[in-house]
Image (spheres, grey):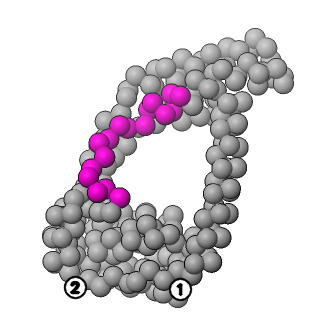
């Protein structure tokens, strides 16, 4: 089902955001209605934009700028969105459950002391490895970085043909891009290191999610 009116409203809001005339608060006003929309394309685009709208459009990288325009193309065209369950390694769940039971057993034997975190280190390393193995090993499509969320260049062409679409030129100030990339690089490194330290010293926090984690879903865009 294509909700053309709501698609046009969301597309107009995205263009205002790219022009610097809208921010996260504007997206939050219509977020709930977009999430419960019967048009799955609106739901998918809104979900993807929740990551970008927290920052100003002037801080977007060229890759993010192009991706948001492909989301715009998805809205402007008659393309539809569906989800397909992606396979993942079921054997990781019983292993995670066994490691979680081991953590509880060690905690009962040693008590909740500082030594407990030392005993958790090897289990934490095993937990991180398990989390990496549980990630779905989906095949990378050719030119995926330049066509996503579409499946191929041909699909992208079909969407272009069905919509009167004009892409805005990337014009983020160079100084903003450079500062953002430098600060983002160091900030991301510190954040990732902090998360890994938590997982190593307190593996039950990650093991719990690995035990209940369900199958991932791949977005399927039918161009039109």
Magenta-colored span: 129-145
Whole-number angstrom distance, CA of label 2 to CA of label 1: 23 Å
> Can you see residue 139?
yes
Q: Quadrant of the C terminus?
A: bottom left
Q: Is mark 2 on a helix, strand or loop?
A: loop
- Residue 185 vs residue 108: left or right? left
Question: Residue 4 appears at what percent x and percent y?
Answer: 25, 79
- Residue 93 vs residue 81: left or right? right
Q: Label 2 belongs to which residue? A: 164
Question: Residue 176 appears at what percent x and percent y?
Answer: 61, 76
Q: Which mark is residue 172?
A: none
Residue drawn at x 26%, y 83% is 165
Q: What element carries label 1?
A: loop
Note whether 11 is above or below 60 in the view shown.
below
In depth, the one of 65 and 123 nearer the eye is 65
Question: Residue 214 appears at what percent x and percent y?
Answer: 41, 37
Q: Quadrant of the N terminus?
A: bottom left
Residue drawn at x 29%, y 85% is 166
Residue drawn at x 24%, y 57% is 151
Q: Which residue is farthest top?
A: 109
131 in magenta: yes
Note whether 199 is above or below 108 in the view shown.
below
Asked if the residue under mark 1 is in contact with the one under mark 2, i.e. CB atoms within 8 Å, the reply is no
Q: Which mark is residue 20?
A: 1
For label 1, the crowd category at 10 Å Cα-Cα, with few meaning under 14, some 14 to 19 and many 20 or more, is few
141 in magenta: yes
> Can you see residue 22?
no
């Amino acid at each position: 089902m294509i909700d053309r009116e709501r698609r046009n409203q969301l597309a107009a809001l995205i263009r205002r955001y790219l022009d610097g005339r809208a921010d996260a608060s504007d997206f939050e006003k219509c977020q709930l209605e977009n999430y419960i929309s019967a048009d799955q394309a609106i739901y998918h685009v809104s979900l993807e934009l929740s990551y970008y709208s927290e920052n100003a459009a002037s801080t977007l990288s060229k890759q993010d700028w192009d991706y948001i325009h492909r989301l715009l193309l998805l809205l402007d065209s008659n393309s539809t969105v569906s989800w397909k369950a992606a396979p993942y390694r079921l054997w990781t769940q019983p292993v995670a459950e066994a490691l979680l039971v081991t953590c509880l057993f060690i905690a009962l034997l040693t008590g909740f002391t500082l030594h407990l975190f030392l005993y958790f280190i090897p289990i934490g390393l095993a937990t991180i490895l398990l989390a990496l193995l549980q990630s779905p090993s989906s095949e990378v499509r050719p030119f995926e970085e330049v066509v996503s969320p579409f499946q191929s260049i041909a699909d992208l062409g079909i969407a272009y043909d069905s919509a009167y679409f004009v892409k805005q030129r990337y014009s983020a100030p160079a100084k903003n891009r450079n500062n953002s990339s430098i600060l983002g690089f160091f900030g991301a490194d510190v954040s990732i290191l902090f998360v890994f330290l938590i997982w190593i010293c307190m593996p039950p926090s990650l093991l719990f999610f690995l035990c209940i984690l369900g199958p991932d879903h791949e977005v399927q865009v039918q161009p039109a």
